[in-house]
Image (cartoon, coloured by chain):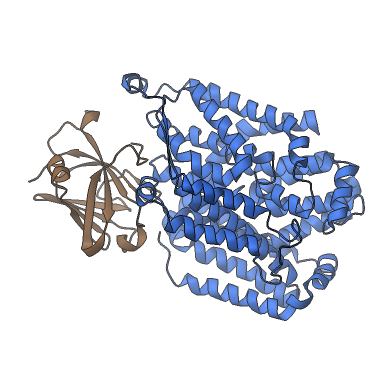
Amino acid sequence: MSTISEILKKKKNGLYYYNRVILPFNGYLLKIIIEDNILTDFSPTSKHIYVKEEDGFMSIYFKEYRHLEEEVSKYEAIKIVIVEKDKDIFDLKNHRKLALYPGENHELKIEATDDDILFIE
Amino acid sequence: MFVNKKFHYLTLILMLILVSTMNMFGADSSKILSETSEAVEPNILMVLPFLILLMLIATGPLFYKHFWERNYPKISILLGLITVVYYLYVLKDSYSILHIFTEYVSFIALLSSLFVASGGILIKVDKEATPFVNVLFLLFGAVIANVIGTTGASMLLIRPFIKMNKDRIKPYHIIFFIFIVSNVGGALTPIGDPPLFIGFLRGVPFFWVFVNVWHIWIPTILAILLAFYFVDRRNKTGEDKIAKIDYSGTIEFRGGKNLIYLAGIILAVFIDPNVMSWVPSLSPLPIGIREIIMFGIVYLSYKNAHPDILKANEFDFEPIKEVAYLFIGIFLTMVPALQLIANFAKSNHDLLDATTFYWATGILSAVLDNTPTYMNFLSAAMGKFYLDVNVQSQVLEFVSKDDVFLRAISVSAVFFGAMTYIGNGPNFMVKSISERAGIQMPSFFAYVFKYAIPILLPIYVIVWLIFF
């Protein structure tokens, strides 16, 4: 299983299909911002989102969306705050802010957010 | 967003009705105006679509967000269509609809061009955001709002303001930004806020607002800034983190060519047949040379913007689309409400004084759009002197007769736009950008009852007591 740092270093992409995003790592999600929706409820009963952990990757289903490609615009990112699996979730230094850009052929570009991107945790 | 493409058909139907209207009545619209505005009064029940739309805007994002996000364009256009059909086929009044649609096109042309042109500019301020620095920043925003409009200033400055405060940001930062930069700041020139711009087009001299309002603007801005300073001083969030950051104190500015586009928009404001006689009127089309230039700037500034800047700004047309769809409904459905108010004001003009104009314009500007509200109360105030708002020389005569009414209307139309998210176009855009940055903004009612009424209303009461 690759770590988030390795994925970012190798510039490895994730995938997306319709409302499902597949990230090539496992982690503890803390916050997701998609358009102007701020999501923090990741419980199984959440109306907005469903997170499924699998061996070596994780899937996020955006229940209120149909086609992420159509609904998230060209310069817009889905932003997430995530902690690497097995790292201390209570240490703020471990909170990684990532920007996910849906691209062509179902590819999902994963980038660490830089200072330019507005992203308040 | 969640918009189903079918609603485009509704938009198309609306456009077809308006175009057919132009063919039916366009040749003699001024005659129809005089006949309908004097003789025909809409049924009071026709205020319902407007009230329903306002209620949905207020409650939708709060109680049925998913439904609302998917359907607000359809709802807004459908409610607008009810008013359009009523006016065209029951009142036989096409002028009122065409007139408001023309104002809507001007409104969207200005907002969208400022939105897109400023979206191609990236400002980075590497400076510690102390309460005092924030006050200076907001004061700068208030001043610049008079040069590039409240929309331009809001779009240009909201991102650097959030970035400066990123380790200590709270919703009140955004709300005070809306108060000062998106609204009150722009009260000094006709470019500052759309109602003043409409007044200018009708014949109010360009510098009249500055000369007559600066002494109200300064204490009001200072009072809101003072309130902000005391609130911000109590915010100790992120102090440890901020103390460790080595700020360079520099300001980086990218996308300078878009300043040319902004200058173009400001110049285009004056390209109007009422201001420059050589400018051709495209009447009865609901668009003029000015709007064509502004929409041209939307296209050019987006096409030529640097992708890195658009990415850093997370540029998205959604906020302006949201404003465009909601305001087509607001503009159309508020026609009956505004006409009823105007007729009431005209028939009771002897009872109306500066206090009435100040509060009535203000309260309605908070929940309606402030531009037509301003126009109707200007018309009512001129009615006191048997003058016609449609005649430029009479507007000038009114200004020279007794300017307290115009001052009351101008000040309250701009100031009270800050009372709700729907009071002024940029309010919604700033809210949307902030939410996309991860800031949980207060609901419609929380904004009004937790922030606008406790902070702004006492200041506006003092303004009224001293100046009106």
Residue B452 horizontal side relative to residue B91, left or right: left
From the image, state the color of chain B. blue
Q: Is residue B310 visible?
A: yes
Q: How many marks?
A: 0
Residue B67: x %, y % from top left: 44, 60
**B303 vs B184: above or below:** below
**A63 vs B158: above or below:** below
- The image quadrant that residue B43 belongs to is bottom right
Residue B28 horizontal side relative to residue B179, left or right: right
Q: Residue at x 42, y 40 (%)?
A: B440
Q: Residue at x 75, y 53 (%)?
A: B375
Q: Is residue A90 visible?
A: no
User: Which chain is drawn using brown?
Assistant: A
Residue B85: x %, y % from top left: 66, 74
In front of the other: B442 or B430:
B430
Residue B180: x %, y % from top left: 59, 35
Q: Quadrant of the C terminus of chain B?
A: top right
Q: Residue at x 40, y 59 (%)?
A: B1
In front of the other: B341 or B293:
B293
- The image quadrant that residue B159 belongs to is top left
**B414 vs B239: above or below:** below
Residue A28 horizontal side relative to residue B377, left or right: left
Residue B179: x %, y % from top left: 59, 37
